[in-house]
Image: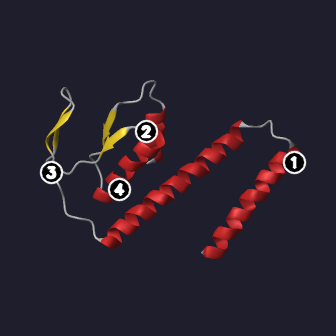
Amino acid sequence: MHGLFNWIENFGKKPEEVFVVHGQDTVCDTFAQNLEDKFELKAWAPFSGSSYDLAKGNWITEKSGNYISPEKEKLRKATGSYLKLNNSVEKLLELIKRNNKLSKKEAEEIAKQIDIIAKRLEIEK
């Protein structure tokens, strides 16, 4: 999924709409939601059999699927939260790699805060 995020990030002009049409329903929904949240794109995860008129910009047929059980919905939300957390970690790592102008004190303070988070996650394991 991160490769797809990188692909979208490298567009000079972002697409106006994105259609996620490959993968499990919950994964498609989560990925579409992440595209909306991260890139502020209109993102759709249509059910099989739906059709969209790209020239007119509207749905011709929009199929619906089965409702997601509360257990599956909880898992979908957890997966989305995990992806957001993972995206934040990747962003932090990239910023650290690019920012070599931190003072020793700043770098040590950031490292200390990251260690606190890591210890918290180890305790909750």
Q: Counting other residues with Cα less than 10 Å from the Cα at mark 1, is it few (<14), some (14-19), or many (20 or more)?
A: few
Residue type at mark 4?
Val
Query: Which of the marked residues, 2 or 1, is nearer the chain's N terminus?
Result: 2
Circle 1 SS class = helix
- Which label belongs to residue 27? 4
Q: Residue at x 81, y 40 (%)?
A: 102
Q: Nearer the viewer, mark 3 or mark 4?
A: 3
Residue type at mark 1?
Lys
Could you tell me residue 82's position as x and y percent? 50, 59
- Which label belongs to residue 63? 3
Could you tell me residue 8's position as x and y percent? 43, 35
Q: Counting other residues with Cα less than 10 Å from the Cα at mark 2, is it few (<14), some (14-19), or many (20 or more)?
A: few
Q: Residue at x 17, y 55 (%)?
A: 64
Query: Which of the marked residues, 4 or 2, is nearer the chain's N terminus?
Result: 4
Q: Quadrant of residue 103?
A: top right
**Front in this rendered view, residue 74 or 9:** 74
Q: Nearer the viewer, mark 2 or mark 1?
A: 2
Viewport quadrant of the C terminus? bottom right
Could you tell me residue 46's position as x and y percent? 23, 48
The relative height of residue 52 versus residue 113 in the rendered view (above or below) is: above
Residue type at mark 2?
Glu
The relative height of residue 56 versus residue 95 in the rendered view (above or below) is: above
Query: What residue sits right under mark 1 in the picture?
Result: 105
